[in-house]
Amino acid sequence: MTAPSITVSETPLVLYTLRRADDALILGHRLSEWCGHAPVLEEDMALSNMALDLIGQARELYGYAAKVEGRDNDEDKLAYLRDVRQYRNLLLVERPNGDFAQTMVRQLFYAAFADLYWRGMMGSTDATLAAVAAKSEKECAYHLRHASEWVIRLGDGTDESHRRAQAAVDDLWAYTGEMFNIDDSERSLIDAGIAIDPTMLLPEWLSIVSHVAREATLTLPENDWMQRGGRDGRHSEHLGHLLSELQYMQRSFPGATW
Amino acid sequence: MATPNTPLWEVFIRSRNGLAHKHCGSLHAPDATMALQAARDLYTRRGEGLSIWVVPSSAITASDPADKGMMFEPAESKIYRHPTFYEVPEEVGHM
Amino acid sequence: MYTQALNSPEEGSHAEDAVRASRFQARIDAEERIEPNAWMPAAYRKTLVRQISQHAHSEIVGMLPEGNWITRAPSLRRKAALLAKVQDECGHGLYLYAAAETLGASREELVDAMLAGKAKYSSIFNYPTLTWADIGVIGWLVDGAAIMNQIPLCRCSYGPYARAMIRVCKEESFHQRQGYEIMLTLCRGTAEQKAMAQEALNRWWWPVLMMFGPPDQASQHSDASTKWKIKRFSNDELRQKFIDATVPQAQYLGLTMPDPEMKQDEQGHWRHGPIDWNEFKQVLAGNGPCNRDRLAARRKAHADGAWVRDAAAAYAEKRARRQMAQAAE
């Protein structure tokens, strides 16, 4: 017996909140995969701390999405009982950890965005989202600093680390554009002052990332072709495997309390 | 092959406003910036800190326990440095 | 007892050391704490480095069996708690390596010895975590047993070890509770969940009893460690204390102890049946179900991280050079 997926009524605000919740959960899950396997023990501590920040953000956002939806879904049903096509996270955050350079460059790209994004969202007319933003902004500011310091060390470290860091930048670049996309459902929220317009964040994001890349002696790709689809549930092959692990218990033991 | 050593740092944390930084342990990090980050992640997980110092362990000079006698015992007999050495009549009140 | 110390060349002449050793023992007997740069018998130092580093290795290897369930934890609340707990184990490993380093060993050499299979860690982490209930049992029993061992160590004669243990014990107080809460939830859940809890208890109970080490008459290290106040209770004393604390907790859960011979004696102590010490010996010798997997995982993390550590070291050197050049301008 397995537990079937739930259905979610994705009103614009529910969908919007789920997208951010899924970003946080999936990236938190990825970072938690490092626990016990990091390059130095001090990094096991750091990566776990960041994973915990993100899982905490996800829980608050799922809780809010469930409340707004107003049916009997809750944080765990939303996390554990939606299938890959129902997940709304960015493609960037589901990228596999790869080597430490891939993980740190992914962190840099996402945290540089998330820090700006949550700072903007602190002014949301939605009190709950504004409160989540105030907490998340501080967390993501630290994630950004942590990732920047590492990317600089990897880029400007040894020949091998430079090569790996540059490869990570080249591999992940095409997944950064999706962070700045908006669709019709988001536009209505932006107009209402509930959400912010992410396209406004692009210049500053680019300036932060370029600054770190310069320090790290890395080159940002010229290529501006960007992958998209995660926000609408069109994911890479990796997400299904991640979810089969994440959801294993809830799927295998329908309705049980843990 | 033996793993090369990463420098050792001593960590000092001020837990509340108005208190002094207190030694709380050590850690390994390649440089001061990373040491500060690692100290934050290792020693302030439960809200223990408001401020962190990291100092290279090699920069610390410690007194030799064998010198305990000459270093610290001479102070013990100087009891006139303490207020209780002096007698003030009770009627005078708290002083 | 101090023969080894007296024969150690760096510790000076026999006559001088005999005097120092008796002064040292007097300090221990007076419950004074020994600090890193104080004189100590070489055997005391060696015993401590061995014990503290084994303890540190246990924390680090101990991340693996529980880490095995972080990505599969059945709720977000459980996932956060488990991740924080496994992260704590890492932190505890770091506090302990730092304590060992005050004795003149480097973390790198200690870790290298562990990766080479030359240093031991707790036998318990060589058993697999097969179901979610194992996470409950580990918190409840493995951490429970560890706490029994660790609380007396907070008064250990070596200052840095005692201080590390105080911090560890303070942080670990949530570990056992989260484990018991998992067990309670399972035992109050469906029949399938309760069976999962019982099955996990059956598998872990005997290995947990072995965590306290061989019976007193067979233990090699206890005499000196007791005299030096590194160890304050014998293996059997701690084991008994643990069982007496655990049996009522199991009864509350409605679980059956997997020991048909277990009986309460007239003093109220729960007496266990025979422990399979051969199994314990085999696990310590490297033949437990997961010894090879655990070492392989730690070796892989270490090897995969080498280029990262090299990069950070190279960057630190470059930065120092640049700063020097700047200062010279």
Image (cartoon, rainbow, N blue to C red):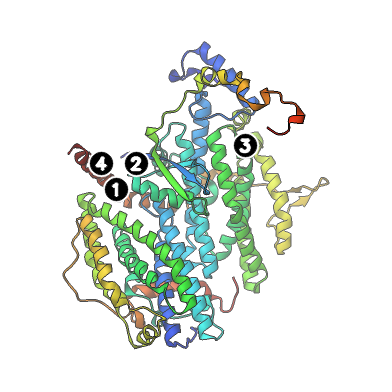
Q: Residue at x 51, y 25 (%)?
A: C38
Tell me the chain of label 1: C
Q: Which residue corresponds to mark 1?
A: C312
N-terminal-most mark, 1 or 4: 1
The percent coordinates of residue C77 (x first, y second) are 54, 67
For the residues labelled 3 and 4, the Cα–Cα distance comes to 42 Å
Q: Position of residue C231 (x, y in %)?
A: 62, 35
Q: Amino acid at mark 1?
A: Ala
Residue A251 seen by the camera: no
Quickly name the residue at label 3: C155
Q: Are circles 1 and 2 on residues that touch, CB within 8 Å?
A: yes
> Where is mark 2, residue-wise?
B6
Identified at 34% across, 68% down, the residue is A116
Q: Chain of mark 3?
A: C
Q: CA distance from mark 1 to mark 3?
A: 38 Å
- Quarter of the image that includes the C terminus of chain A: bottom right
Q: Nearer the viewer, mark 1 or mark 4?
A: 4
Determine which residue is flagged by label 4: C320
Vertically, is A233 above or below A243? Answer: below
The answer to which of marks 1 and 3 sits earlier in the sequence is 3
